[in-house]
């Protein structure tokens, strides 16, 4: 007579690793607040920080993932930093601080209402 077959174990399920879609902002350092969106119809990838409002757009292809958009953003920021260092390390030419010094933008003064009507 034959030996009784023992039940065999089922193969373990492979855990599918998913890539992140939210990342840490490079400017305000808040974690998981940079949202990446992919528009495959227009081949455009976009990311946006919920806190500081930084945004970035890049061209994508059919296999692009949110992590690819984030890495393109990091590369673009590094390129801008290197370019600023080549121009003498002066980052003022990229800022809007010059307008404040010239008086281009100023805070509007508060207009008080007539106090004469209150004295009646």
Image: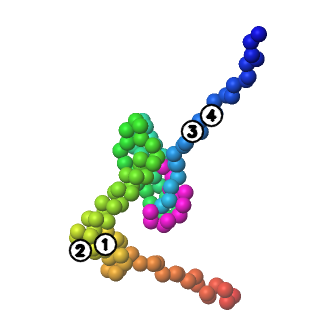
Q: Identify the element where label 1 is drawn.
A: helix
Could you give the CA–CA distance between mark 1 and mark 2, rounded to whole angstroms? 9 Å
Q: Which mark, residue 62?
A: none
Q: Identify the element where label 3 is drawn.
A: loop
Q: Write the residue at 41% across / 37% down.
A: 63
Q: Nearer the viewer, mark 3 or mark 4?
A: 4
Left or right, 26 with reference to 4: left
Q: Residues within 10 Å of mark 1 (few under 14, many from 20)?
A: few
Looking at the image, tell me whether mark 2 or mark 3 is earlier in sequence order: 3
Q: Nearer the viewer, mark 4 or mark 1?
A: 4
Q: Write the residue at 27% across / 70% down.
A: 85
Q: Residues within 10 Å of mark 4 (few under 14, many from 20)?
A: few
Residue highlighted by disc 4: 13
Q: Write the residue at 31% across / 62% down.
A: 80
Left or right, 83 with reference to 29: left
Residue highlighted by disc 1: 91
């Amino acid at each position: 007579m034959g030996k009784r077959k023992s039940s065999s174990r089922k193969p373990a399920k492979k855990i599918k690793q998913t890539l992140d879609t939210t990342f840490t902002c490079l400017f305000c350092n808040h974690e998981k607040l940079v949202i990446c969106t992919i528009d495959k119809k227009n081949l455009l990838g976009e990311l946006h920080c919920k806190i500081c409002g930084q945004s970035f757009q890049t061209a994508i292809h059919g296999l692009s993932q949110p992590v690819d958009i984030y890495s393109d953003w990091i590369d673009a920021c590094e390129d801008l930093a290197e370019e600023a260092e080549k121009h003498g390390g002066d980052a003022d030419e990229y800022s809007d601080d010059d307008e404040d010094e010239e008086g281009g933008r100023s805070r509007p003064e508060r207009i008080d209402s007539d106090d004469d009507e209150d004295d009646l």
